[in-house]
Amino acid sequence: MNIPEAYRSYLFPDSRWLPAIDWNVKLYGAHMQRVSKGWTVPQESHHAFELILILKGTQTTEMENVGYELKAGDILLIPPGFKHVNRSAREEGLTYFVAHFNVDNALFRQEMTRHSQFYFPSGDETNVRLKAAMMKWIELLQERGCDYTSADLFRIQAGLFEIFGILAEQASAGIEHSVSPAAGQYARLIAEAIKAKFEPGKLAKYGENERDVRIEAIAVSLNISPGYALEVFQKVYGMSPRKYLSELKLHEAKQLILQPDLALSAVASLLGYSSIAHFSRQFKRWTGMSPRKFRQSTLESEPHHTLR
């Protein structure tokens, strides 16, 4: 029953209401992996959040020119758009668990990118709560492997919402919110319009590329000015719409490249590139290595379990 808030106290003076929630939430995947000394992930950034739990060994991470030495039990949050490099430099290697996720809620994204604690050392109160939630995923991953039931998927998503609550709670205390609900809604709608344009199959069919996603056209469809559209999107997502689309493409490109039976020329086509040479040049600008080298270096790592 959808009753405007202004009428609720009049119609139901003794009632209490929970708010309606309409967020686009996505878990892009999570995996546990053991790697040897010398393993490294070249500098990258994502359009999604990345949450890393070190299970064994030591990982060194440089994020936005700040260095972290993560030991067993430590947790690191990497917000969208933050450039980072991960390495294993110790003889014993390391085992880590990482999840990538996103939510189109303006206030949450703002809190996470501007006011959040990123490093949660083992034993920290927030670390204990986050680790408990992440260990539920790990236990399910070890039990199921790749065969998840519908009940499992609901439990996985419930764990994600628990993590959202923990992160939001530690970030939001005592801050003033500078994004209005209307601005946050416009930013979310712009992101949705960009994602609607970005569909690998659609890109392949129509040959679309980044220039075809025009903020001017999206702004017109929302009855706002292009300048305002750019302003609210940058404020909420911490990056331009063009950069957001590039991050979507990079994430999808990595997922496709890591399918060993899929030819790299097919990957390029699915992502809307006219040739594999064009795709390779763009991928190298993103990651510092060619698609072929990225596939070889990643697949040659020791096997990992994936939770999707």
Image: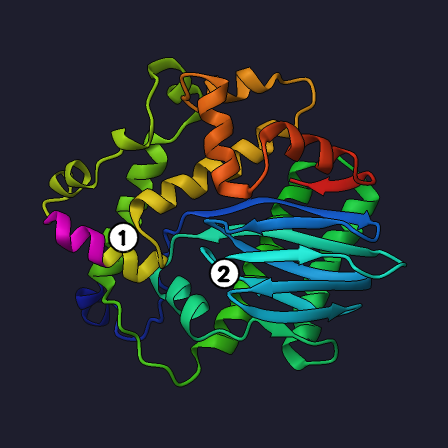
- Please say if 277 is above or below 138: above
CA gap between label 2 and label 1 equals 17 Å
Q: Write the residue at 72% across / 68% down.
A: 70
| Residue closest to the eye, 127 or 287 | 287
From the viewer's perspective, is 146 left or right of 308?
A: right
Secondary structure type for disc 1: helix
- Color style of the picture: rainbow
Of the numbered discs in the image, which one, if any, rests on residue 79?
2
From the viewer's perspective, is 61 left or right of 110?
A: right
Q: In which quarter of the image is residue 130?
A: bottom right
Q: Write the residue at 51% across / 27% down.
A: 280
- Please say if 27 is above or below 232: above
Residue that numbered label 1 is attached to:
187
The magenta segment is 225-231
Counting residues from the N terminus, which is met first, the one under dot 2 or under dot 1? Answer: 2
User: Contact (CB < 8 A) between labels 2 and 1?
Assistant: no
In reply to whether residue 230 is colored magenta, the answer given is: yes
